[in-house]
Amino acid sequence: MKLRSTDLRHQQEIATPYGRFTAYYSRAGLARLDFPDEPAGSSVAVDSGLATTSVEQWHSLVEQALLAGLEGQAPAELPPLDVSGGTELEQLVWAFLQRIPPGERRSYSEVAEAIGRPQAARAVGRACGANPVPVLIPCHRVVTADGGLGGYSGGVHWKRRLLDLEERHAPIFSSSPVASID
DNA sequence: CATGAGATTGTAA
DNA sequence: TTACAATCTCATG
């Protein structure tokens, strides 16, 4: 039986220097994370049947992971992520994204190759856009092949900000943006 | 270097 | 089956 993203049972907010994020939990784990000032989906009814202690533990981890991410650092530990709503390709992509260290970037085509579908760069972009847990699943580290930013569901300003923070914290060695040196 | 058309894949309607 | 998407590549001017 397939768990669907509509099985959200808890909704909780996280205060950050950039505003209040909203986390949504299913019985399997963190199912969705929203940026601040987004029209939140209708508030989720709290299901008392779900073990509240689990959610609180998960939420504590999410809180730490998110705050670390917003400082350009890798999270110490992640809660279970409920990505069961995604297609097979999406889950492949999301799993791979978590293996890209902070400060590093991959192009959409590089991700496509890494998951065994070298021609599917565009489909990868689409899969990134479907990522329900931004920041923790670092879809912002995927950029265009020509060095551009590419798109971002939460708004490109977030993507630029996240990459900026990470580069500041984990500077890349001697890779000047432009190749031409006189 | 800037621009645009064509190629390509995966999804949802 | 059709249309769309967070792309890529290559041919031109």
Image (cartoon, coloured by chain):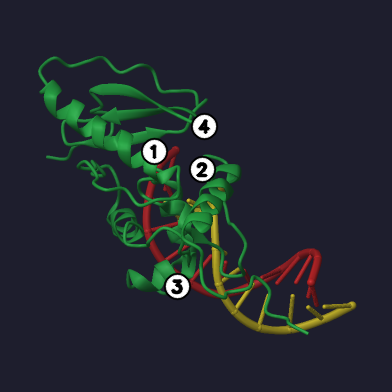
Chain colours: A green, B red, C yellow
The answer to whether dots 4 and 3 both sit on one chain is yes
User: In the rendering, at what x and y percent does residue A27 appear?
Assistant: 16, 31
Label 4 sits on a secondary structure element that is loop
Position of A43 relative to B6 (above/below):
above
Mark earlier in primary sequence (3, 1): 1
User: In this figure, which residue is indicated by the disc labeled 3?
Assistant: A119
Residues packed near mark 4 inside 10 Å, few (<14), some (14 to 19) or many (20 plus): few
* Cα–Cα gap, marks 2 and 4: 17 Å
Q: Residue at x 13, y 29 (%)?
A: A54
The image's mark for residue A67 is 1
Mark earlier in primary sequence (4, 3): 4
Label 4 resides on the chain identified as: A
Label 2 sits on a secondary structure element that is loop
Label 2 resides on the chain identified as: A
Frontmost residue, A152 versus A130: A152
User: In the rendering, at what x and y percent does residue A166 appear?
Assistant: 48, 54
Q: Describe residue A74's horizontal placement relative to residue A49 as left or right.
A: right
Q: Describe residue A67's horizontal placement relative to residue A1 as left or right.
A: right
Work out which quarter of the rendered image holds the N terminus of chain A and state it. top left
User: In the rendering, at what x and y percent does residue C3 appear?
Assistant: 56, 49
Tell me if label 4 and label 3 are in contact, CB under 8 Å.
no
Mark earlier in primary sequence (2, 4): 4
Q: Inspect the image, locate mark 3, and give the three-letter code of the amino acid beneath it.
A: Gln
